[in-house]
Amino acid sequence: MCNDGPRNMTTNIRSLRAVFSALTPRVAGQILISGAAGLVAWELFARLIAPLWLGFALDPTGLIQMATGVSGSPAEILHLLTGLVLFPAGYVVVAAPLLRRVAGLAW
């Protein structure tokens, strides 16, 4: 069992505060714009390029239905929410800080 202790907990809370304090309206807008660009690129790949390589189009809502049992409009909304917000926000909150810490790279 791991006991981080109060010192590490305080450091973790400060790190979370730093991440969320950096979430300004400008950064939120960048998250949505980059999410929209990524979603458009993915949809073009899934619907146009993948059929040429695989012989069938990729269907993210079908994957959502298979994994969660959610289908129809809720699956499409979940797909859009994931592409527009969750993946790019995950990059900002998880991947970018790791890149800065490990490799010294700025995002």
Image (tube, rainbow, N blue to C red):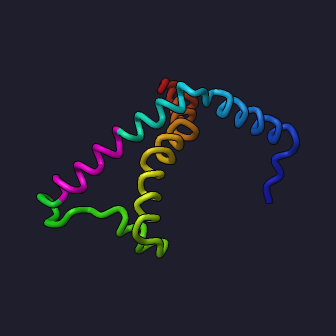
Residue at the image position 77 percent from the left and 38 percent from the top: 13
Residue at the image position 23 percent from the left and 48 percent from the top: 44
x then y, percent, for residue 41: 28, 43
84 w.r.t. 25: above or below: below
Residue at the image position 86 percent from the left and 45 percent from the top: 5
Q: In terms of secondary structure, what is the magenta stretch mainly?
A: helix
In this view, the residue in front, 18 or 39, is 39
- Which picture quadrant has residue 28? top right
x then y, percent, for residue 33: 41, 34
x then y, percent, for residue 81: 47, 51
x then y, percent, for residue 35: 41, 40
97 w.r.t. 3: above or below: above
Tell me if residue 67 is in the magenta stretch. no
Label count reads 0
Q: Quadrant of the N terminus?
A: bottom right
In this view, the residue in front, 51 or 75, is 75
31 w.r.t. 73: above or below: above
Residue at the image position 23 percent from the left and 50 percent from the top: 45
Tell me if residue 38 is in the magenta stretch. yes
Q: Please provide the residue range marked out in magenta.
A: 37-50
